[in-house]
Image: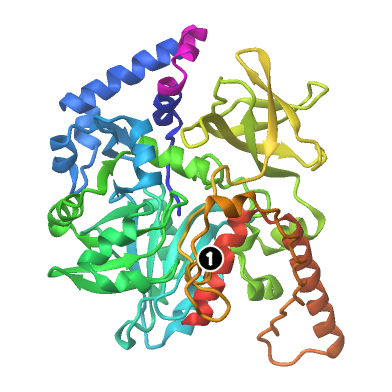
Amino acid sequence: MNEDQNTEEVVEDVAEEAAPEQVSEGSETAEAKEEATKSSAEAASGEKPAEEAQTLKATPLWALHKERRGKMVPFAGYEMPVQYRRGIMEEHKQTRERAGLFDVSHMGQAFLVLDGEGGHDDIAALIETLVPGEIKGLKPGGIRYTLLLNEEGGIMDDLMVTRPEGEENEGMLFLVVNAATKEGDFAYISEKLNGKARLILAGDRALMALQGPRAAKVLKRLAPFVETMGFMTAKAARIDGVEVIVSRCGYTGEDGFEISVPAEMAEAFARKLLGHREVQLIGLGARDSLRLEAGLCLYGHDIDEETTPIEAGLTWAIGKRRKMEKDFPGAEKIMSQLMDGAPRRRVGIKPKGRAPAREGTEIVNNDGDVIGKITSGGFGPTIKSPIAMGYVDASLPENETEIGLLIRGKVHEAEIVPLPFVEQRYYRADKVEEEDKDKNGRKRRKRTKKDDKKPAKEKKSAKKKKADVEEPETEKVSDETAEKTKAEVVEIEIKEASEAPAIEETVAEAEEETDERS
């Protein structure tokens, strides 16, 4: 999903482990490393500056992190583990190949409940006045990634909205927001929906993420029902006597789950998961390198209040019906950018050398003109190369991929590449069935090395689907207005289809399929 605050310094450790020769290239880097090491040593030993000792909060898993020798650092107002003894590189690899357990209890959890009588449509209509996501269309147990927008169309935060299952939960939504923005988010939502809905903060709950290709295998030993859960779905259940909310989603690009548990039960539950040999504790450093490889935005850096969803490449987070009704904050500006183009766009960047490009690094074109800045950068352990994301001016032609990065006064060669850097492996039931069975339902023969030597068959051209246009939910409109609205939506969808990178399509398609299955 999302994260918060600056983990760029945190992930610098990854680059140093992978390319230590870069540390000596400049005194600034060496000083930064020395300062970071000093800060981390203080946190790990429990010796914090007086002001930090008074203000830093601890998650319910703090004692477990200390016991496992986590290197603790200040993060979003909490003392959090940046890494453990194995180091960021190994933790990153652990999550990509097996399963990693992350403490994300610092993030904000809350239930949004109607003040009066009503059902899902009523509470959805209220939250839709603040976000562009299709919340009304959520089926019980469905999750939607969406954006909290200001009146200018800027992104105040990105968040997850879940519609809980059960008749007793009609008229309720479960929200998860970023840690650094949670107080502001909750205050803003409460103010805007005052008298219509109220927020019940879930500060008494911890949140952990179990991510990686073995995550489902591990969790289903404790809760068999998770095996059939679809991507972007949630379920409240009792696991070993603990009341939990299990969501199949995550922030690593891997299959996995986020598990909300009562704070007093968190440590025991985490230890139970860590009792499986496939699972290891993972810190914030690897969490950042994993999300960067997956092309996921970090709030406060890749997206902020000055960034619109169109610029950020998050058009897919705006529901079809919402585009038609244009009734979300900043809709006029956002729809104008969607139709006519935004002044800048977020892109993936791969430096050609070994020097990582940090946040704030200027991007130049072939003529040496500054055309943008890096917003996230570090080392990609999976692809063994520096990677970055940033924004470039719309003036840069889309087919022009060769760029330069100004690092310590010197231009380093780089190229614009498609996002994500590493293929996402979110759970897709249709893909699993397709891989396991042939058209007649028979179990598919496993591929062998001989098969790889055979000439590849030409791929059949995919049939173009006619745009599925939803009718606007208005009382009566003229035929002329209706046709104009339909034409606009068709034009928008054609434009999106030609521009949407794989990461957008993956999440958007999965959400639509979840709605249909539900």
Magenta stretch contains residue 23 = yes
User: How far from the left and from the top, in percent, is residue 216?
Assistant: 33, 61
User: How far from the left and from the top, in percent, is residue 295?
Assistant: 55, 45
User: How far from the left and from the top, in percent, is residue 283?
Assistant: 31, 38
Q: Relative to 144, does residue 299 appear above or below in the rendering? A: above
Q: Name the residue under label 1.
A: 130
Q: Which residue is drawn at 16% across and 25% down?
A: 45
Magenta stretch: give its range.
16-28
Q: Relative to 486, does residue 104 appear above or below in the rendering? A: above
Q: Which residue is drawn at 23% across and 21% down?
A: 41
Left or right: 25, with 307 as reference point: left
Q: What amino acid is at disc 1?
A: Leu
Q: Dividing the picture into quarters, in which one does residue 465 lie? A: bottom right
Q: Residue at x 41, y 16 (%)?
A: 32
Q: Relative to 93, does residue 255 appear above or below in the rendering? A: below
Q: Farthest right residue? A: 480
